[in-house]
Image: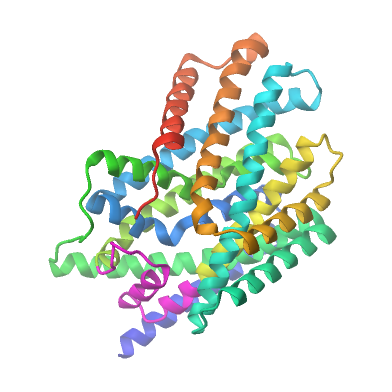
Amino acid sequence: MGNEIVFNGLLVLTSLMVIIFLSRPVLRNNQKWQAMLTPLSSIVGSGFLIMAPLLASIVGKLSPLAVLGIVLLAYGIGHVIRFNICHVEPRIADGTLLKRTKEIEYIGNIVLVLAYMVAVAFYLSLLSSFSLNYLGISNLIYERWMTTSIIIFIAVVGYIKGLSGLEKLESLSMTVQLAIIVALLIGLGIFGMNFMASGEMLEFVHQQRPISTQIQMLAGALLVVQGFETSRFIGEKYSAKIRVDSMRNAQIISGILYVVSVILFMPIVQNIDLIHVELADIIDATGSAALILPLMLMVAAVMSQFSAAIADTGGAGGLLNENSNKRLSTKVAYVGVSMCAILLVWSVDLMEIIALASKAFATYYLSQTLLALYYCRQDCPAKSRMTIVQRVLYIVISIILLYVIFFAIPAE
């Protein structure tokens, strides 16, 4: 018992040390770090805790390979968007882009802003539902009012303080979240070493499906790591180079976190009901690694949904500002996105339309890939043309995204 108390205390102390480290002025005043918070918040907040059980319910022991494939594909899509930031975006700004090329960009942006509105409403609805259920309250009206209050709070901060205000909320949320994730990985790592030393074998009880169905479900899981594209829409404050670097860094950091966490979660996940995966069950199961982890992860789960919603609000606001040729300020756009999210919260079943939002994100990624290919075929100077390797990579990504759009299905 004494050793358990010491171990739990060390995990708490580790989180506090990470919070102190990430709160240093040198990071708060670093543009690259601040620019990275938006994509990192959205990527990690989209599904860090759910990824391991989600993949285990689909492919069991092959989950580490599956998450590696998803992360690499997402990084490839990020490469496409970084190419467009460097080459297409300046031509949009100076008005020299061909009309047809600009239309591809515009249509993709419209699809994405709709997806962002649904995502904001969905993330915060999950936050409210989970928080109230943890307190023993199960009431849809209460959940909707709580969600509405949080959305209004984000809108007010965005309108008064602009992008900088939203970034401060993201910074606070991500600092706490990353601190807990570090403690989680340490706790799971030690639990995993003890599991290996015991000589036990991993055994996953999950629904057996045809390989074709598994691939369709894995295609849907791509959108769990959505969020890196938000770097594209914070140009109001950051240069193209900073946004490209911050997006790349956010994808590398989040990719490592996803792969490592899925591997370390395996001994825990095998004890969860993989037929009906629930976030609360995942959090409770971590208690077998350390008694303090369920409480810490409850906080992380709330913070992850909050930070993802803020990041997507920021992305949607910047996107609307860009699409309106700066006629609509980002501050007003934040309020507009928030109002639409509130309408969604009160008028539709978000669980039903989130699948459509996932396909909308894939459609946006496809439009960005086609934009890059079309731009280099019709519109770009010779010195900016992509290499043969890039062209082949982008064509392969386009084919995969088409598959996601038409054949991806949610995990049951």
Direction from residue 367 to residue 278 in the image, left or right: left
Residue extending farthest to the right is: 327
- Residue shown at 77% from the left, 53% from the top: 336
Quarter of the picture containing the C terminus is bottom left
Quarter of the rendering occupied by the N terminus: bottom left
Q: Residue furthest bottom?
A: 2
Q: Is residue 217 left or right of residue 342?
A: left
Residue sitting at x 60%, y 49%: 39
Above or below for 316 versus 203: above
* Residue stretch rendered in magenta on the structure: 271-298
Q: Is residue 154 visible?
A: yes
Q: Is residue 326 above or below residue 166?
A: above
Q: Is residue 174 visible?
A: no
Q: Where does the image place residue 344, in percent across and percent down from the top left?
A: 64, 58
Residue 162, compared with residue 172, is above or below; it is above
Most distant residue in the left direction: 199
Residue 279 lies, in percent from the top left, at 42, 68
Return the residue nearer the eye: 17 or 213: 213
Taking the spot 47% from the left edge, 39% from the top edge, the residue there is 74
Total label count?
Answer: 0
Residue 48 quadrant: bottom left
Q: Residue most toward the top?
A: 382
| x and y percentages locating residue 18 in the rendered image | 54, 68
Scheme of image coloration: rainbow
Residue 397 sits inside the magenta stretch: no
Quadrant in the rendering for residue 27: bottom right
55 or 104, which is in the foreground? 104
Position in image of residue 277 (x %, y %):
35, 64
